[in-house]
Image: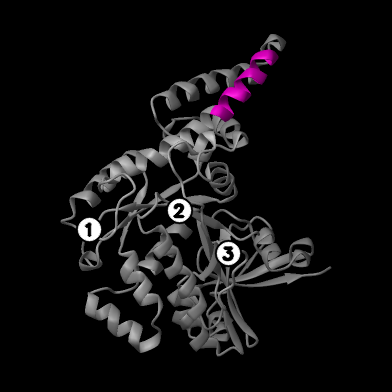
Amino acid sequence: MASRSCGIVGLPNVGKSTLFNAITQAGAESANYPFCTIDPNVGIVEVPDERLTVLTRLVTPQRTVPTTFEFVDIAGLVEGASKGEGLGNRFLSHIREVDAIVHVVRCFEDVNITHVAGKVDPLRDIQIINLELILADLETVEKRFEKVKKMLKSGDKKVQQEMALLERLKEHFDQGRSARSLSVDEEEREILRELHLLTLKPVLYVANVGENEAADATNNPYVTQVIDFAAGEGAEVICISAKVESEIAELDGEDKQLFLEELGLKESGLDRLIRAAYHLLGLITFFTAGPQEVRAWTIPAGTKAPQAAGVIHSDFQRGFIRAEVVSYEDLIHAGSMAKAREQGLLRLEGKDYEMKDGDVVYFRFNV
């Protein structure tokens, strides 16, 4: 499975670059998975997972490999991006390539950091970006509309259904609303997917707060505005101080832990962001564990065992026989794979088995 990615978007001076730099530094500090820059605006980070640490202690393998996640720093945006203003076309093409959007919104005052629009107003900032994405989608829908219009003469029911959906979409966009918020049935959802709309991508809002609010931003009125707006879209909001995250990313081990404790944080905002982005995309983790290697693997929820095996190697999927599965909780409770087998906690699953988050698996195959 190709690496899943989130594109980080935001207006200039909202903390987008500071956050991305924190992500790339965190990746660079990682011992097991060296930070890898695919090109200057892509950062790969580990998905934090305590279960991997516990499995490593249990199995004592030669190496431990976490699963990873990709963040893309999308080119800056100005009003008029949908018409090619600024780096508009590049901005839109990069968003098309990512699986989800992390939308950074400035929720702090700082006289030393000017705001592109003169004053801090998170809702206006959100609307500027959303409107550009909606305008780009409107153009996509209008082009499709003209094609479908010509096909109407055939009397095909599917064509009529698509036409009705396109008309609803146009009306929806005219009201300044995203494709995500349009209520559709399963057949219409399939048509929507084929349009590859930007505003259909899931969004996670990051409220970038001041350093003094890194642990608690409940009294920040800007954050309240973002939470209320996101609730209308069914989206999640995470409060992060990008400035603090860049400082945390420079530390490791005990120093990092002490700094987090001083701030009153259990974990870094970056870890929360990675986890939230992972769940936003409906991803789950399964593990393989043996003396050579303990490893975490990423798959979409609902993946069947042969397809999960294929993530490790195409031969595993092609020659899939069965999967020997034990849940992470059962394995830890048993204390070892041998004891889990003795206690009947190890199950043999076939081709129709749907993988669960935390499954520890050994795939049997024959090619």
Q: Quadrant of residue 303?
A: bottom right
Residue drawn at point x = 27 percent, y = 60 percent = 209
The secondary element bearing badge 2 is classed as helix
Give above or below for 229 relative to 327.
above
Q: Secondary structure at mark 1?
A: loop
Residue 231 in view: no
Give how far across and how far down residue 287 sits, in percent. 57, 73
Instruction: Residue under label 2, please give it.
Output: 280
Write down the region rendered in magenta.
Answer: 139-151
**Looking at the image, is mark 1 or mark 3 nearer the viewer?**
1
Q: CA distance from mark 1 to mark 2?
A: 34 Å
Q: Earlier in the sequence, mark 2 or mark 3?
A: 3
Q: Residue 155 has which mark?
A: none
Q: Main secondary structure of the magenta part?
A: helix
CB under 8 Å between discs 1 and 2:
no
Q: Amino acid at mark 1?
A: Val
Identify which residue is drawn at 58% across, 64% down. 40
Please determine whether, in this image, residue 180 is positioned above or below residue 219.
Answer: above
